[in-house]
Amino acid sequence: MSIKKIDRREALKMSGMGMLGLLLPGLQREPSTPASVPEPAVININANYGKGQWIFDPVGLYIQKGQKVRWIAKQWGGTVMAFHPSNDNHELRIPENAKPFNSGMVPLMMTGWKGLNQFEWTFDVEGTYDYFSRDEEIMGMVGRIVVGKPGGPAEKNAPGYGGRDGRAVVFPREVTMLGFCPSADIVAKKTIPYPKDYLVHPHPYGAEG
């Protein structure tokens, strides 16, 4: 069996290709992986008819920018509407460049049918978002979400400022409830539960028990 002679130039060429093959895996960049998206945060919509309470729980919530919030009705519930002039002429209490959310006119309800008891929204703009339930806001059914860091009209203006400009009124119980969840506490604690034992409506608003 004859062995084919390989000249010096050919040998160098072959060895160079071999070394390049060994180096290439180290030179190749690993494919970039998208940043992990947090799971949707959940806010329960509930009610205690005897006490006359309609509830967003937690009432204060912290999330990351780009995170989704899912409201779930446990009983015949409320609606989910951002404080924004496009929602029943309410004052602006979300970031100026954020799109207002609105679950619709029909209240969410406890049901086995997928979607009829849920509303979801993805928050892509940092800041403070106040929201309300259309028919129950007079009883203090409001909530606050801080996305990333506090900011926007909700931080600059106390509830009720818009009433002076012809906007919808902000009811006293809404002001009280928002006072339970200042943005600094939301950032520190991440969630603030609804204070069920505090806002109990006396007669004639509802019976105890």
Image (cartoon, rainbow, N blue to C red):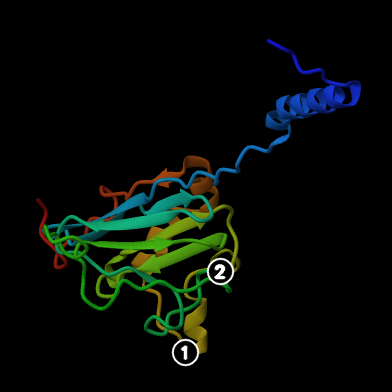
Which comes before the other along the chain, label 1 or label 2?
Answer: 2
- Identify which residue is drawn at 52% across, 42% down: 188
Q: Residue 13: name its quadrant.
A: top right
Q: Tell us which disc is closer to us: 1 or 2.
A: 2
Q: Residue 53: name its quadrant.
A: bottom left
Residue 86 shows which numbered tag? none
Instruction: Tell me residue 92's x, y (percent).
Output: 50, 76
Q: Amino acid at mark 2?
A: Pro
Furthest residue toward right: 8
Closer to us: 167 or 31 = 31
Instruction: Tell me residue 198's x, y (percent).
Output: 29, 51
Closer to us: 4 or 20 = 4
Closer to us: 49 or 110 = 110
Q: Is residue 23 above or below residue 52?
A: above
Q: Is residue 84 above or below residue 198?
A: below
Instruction: Please rate how many residues cluster around mark 1, counting C-alpha atoms within 10 Å: few if below 14, some from 14 to 19, many from 20.
Output: few
Residue wearing tag 2: 95
| Left or right: 36, with 80 as reference point | right
| Left or right: 89, with 2 as reference point | left
Callout 1: SS: loop
Q: Amino acid at mark 1?
A: Gly
| Left or right: 42, with 73 as reference point | right
Instruction: Tell me residue 165's x, y (percent).
Output: 52, 87
- Identify which residue is drawn at 18% across, 62% down: 52
Residue wearing tag 1: 166
Furthest residue toward top: 1
Callout 2: SS: loop
Instruction: Tell me residue 55's x, y (percent).
Output: 26, 58
Image quarter of the N terminus: top right
What is the CA distance from the residue labelled 1 to the residue labelled 2? 20 Å
Instruction: Please rate how many residues cluster around mark 2, counting C-alpha atoms within 10 Å: few if below 14, some from 14 to 19, many from 20.
Output: many
Furthest residue toward bottom: 166
